[in-house]
Image (tube, rainbow, N blue to C red):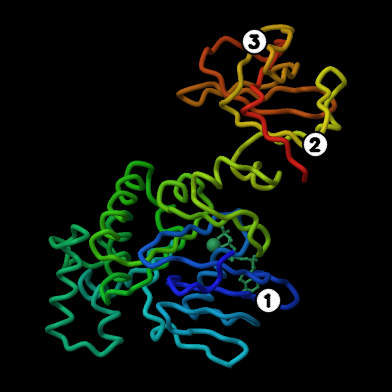
Amino acid sequence: MRQDAPDDFVTIRNVTKKFGEFRALDGLSFSVREGGTLALLGPSGCGKTTMLRCLAGLETPEEGFISIAGKVVFDSAKGINLNPEDRGLGVVFQSYAVWPHMSVVENVEFPLRVRGVAPAERRARAMEILEIVGLTAFASRSATQLSGGQQQRVALARALVHKPALVLFDEALSNLDAQLREHMRLELQALQDRLGFTALYVTHDQGEALGLAETIILMNAGQIEASGPARQVFMTHHSSFAARFFGLNVVETARLAAPHAIAGKPFIAFQREYVRISEGVTGPGSDDLVLLGTIATRSFQGLADEYAIDLGNDVSVRVLDRSGAFSPGQAVSIAISRKDLFLLDA
Ligand SMILES: Nc1ncnc2c1ncn2[C@@H]1O[C@H](COP(=O)(O)OP(=O)(O)OP(=O)(O)O)[C@@H](O)[C@H]1O
Ligand SMILES: [Mg+2]
C-alpha cells in the first residue's frame, strides 16, 4: 500500500497501540487523499475507535507515525506528539456530547472560544454554520431541548465551526432512525462538497460505510483485513472473515455431505440473495452448484423471506427468497451460479 505519497492528506504508518499486553492496533498503515472519504469498518472491538482517538491525539500509540495536511502530529521515533487542539481536526462522537448547560449556539462556539477567537466573530461564525446545518431557529435554545437528530446536527456544527481540514466521525449516524440517517448521509456529502474537508468515518455498519465512503478499510483485531474502493471491497472476497462480515454464507467444503462435494478450495461463500430455491431434489444446471437441504426456519423480512436451511453435518446457510412458497420441514435444493460463488483459501 502507498504510505506517504506527496498527495496523501492523512498518512498513518505502522501505528501500534497497546492496552497492557493487548494490541488494540497492530502496525496499522493507511492514507487518505485530500477531500477524500474513508471508512474504517469492522466488528465491535477491532480497534476502530482506538485508531480514531490516536489520530485525534486522545490516545498515544506506542509506535508509529501520523501526519495530517503535511504536518507531523505524531512520530514515536522523534518523540513528536501534538495536543488534540493543535491537530486541526474536528470530531463527531457517537454520543453527541452536546453540553446541557449551554445553548445551541454556545455549544457550537466552544471550539472557537478554546482557540481564543473574539466573541463577536465567534458568534457570527457559529450562526453561519448553524444555518448550514439548518438549526438557525434553535440557536438560543438549551441543547437538551432538542431531538436526537437535532443534537446530532449541533455536534456536527461544533465539529465544523473552526473549519477543520479533517473531520473524524465515530458511529456518528448510528443512533439515528433509518430515515434520518439516510437524510444525514446525503447532507454530510453535500456539506463535504461545500466545505471541502477530508472525512474519516468509523462504523460497524456496512451500509453506512458503503454509502458514505469512496475507500473502505475493513479491520480485524487491530489489523487491516481488506482495503480499497468501496465497491471492490464489497464485491471481492479474499478471506472468510471478510465474506462473513459482509453477510455472505461461508461454508467449509470439507463439512459438506457427499452429494455437495466440491473440489478445490477449503471454503465456499455466496450472498444470501443470489440463490434459487426449488422444492425437492433438482439436478444442477450446467453452471450451477446445487446444495440439498431442509428448511429449518423462515422469517419474514419485508421484501423477502429469510430461510435458515440445514445442509446436514451441522452446516446451515441463510438465504433470501421472495416467493413466500417454502415452509419449515420442507426438503429443498439451492442453486447458486458459479459466477456468484467465491472459493476461499482461509
Ligand atoms: N482504555 C482501554 N483500556 C483497555 N482496553 C481498551 C481500552 N480502550 C479500548 N480497549 C480495547 O481495545 C479494543 C479495541 O477497542 P475499540 O474501542 O477501538 O473498538 P471498536 O472497533 O471501536 O469497537 P466498537 O464497534 O464496539 O465501538 C477492544 O478490545 C477494547 O476492549
Ligand atoms: Mg468504537
Looking at marks 2 and 1 on the same chain, the residue that comes earlier in the sequence is marked by 1
Instruction: Provide the residue designation for mark 2.
Output: 265
Instruction: Provide the residue designation for mark 3.
Output: 278
Up the image or down, 152 lies above or below 298; here it is below
Looking at the rendered structure, the kind of residue marked 1 is: Lys
Residue 34 spot, x, y in % from top left: 38, 67
Nearest to the eye among marks 2 and 1: give it.
2
Q: Residue at x 56, y 86 (%)?
A: 75
Nearest to the eye among marks 1 and 3: give it.
3
Query: Which secondary structure, mark 3?
Result: strand
Instruction: Provide the residue designation for mark 1.
Output: 18
- Quarter of the N terminus within the rendering: bottom right
Disc 2, disc 1: CB below 8 Å? no
Q: Is residue 148 left or right of residue 104?
A: right
Query: Which secondary structure, mark 1?
Result: strand
Crowd tier of the residue under label 1, counting other residues whose Cα lies within 10 Å: few below 14, some 14–19, many 20 or above: some
Looking at the rendered structure, the kind of residue marked 3 is: Ser
Query: Is the residue marked 1 within 8 Å of ligand 1, measured from its CB?
Result: no
Q: Residue at x 22, y 72 (%)?
A: 103
Q: In 3D space, how far apart are the residues under numbered discs 2 and 3 (Cα atoms)? A: 26 Å
Residue 212 spot, x, y in % from top left: 40, 51
Residue 310 spot, x, y in % from top left: 75, 23
Q: Nearer the viewer, residue 157 or 340?
A: 340
Q: In 3D space, how far apart are the residues under numbered discs 2 and 1 (Cα atoms)? A: 36 Å
Q: Nearer the viewer, residue 226 or 43?
A: 226
Up the image or down, 122 lies above or below 209; here it is below
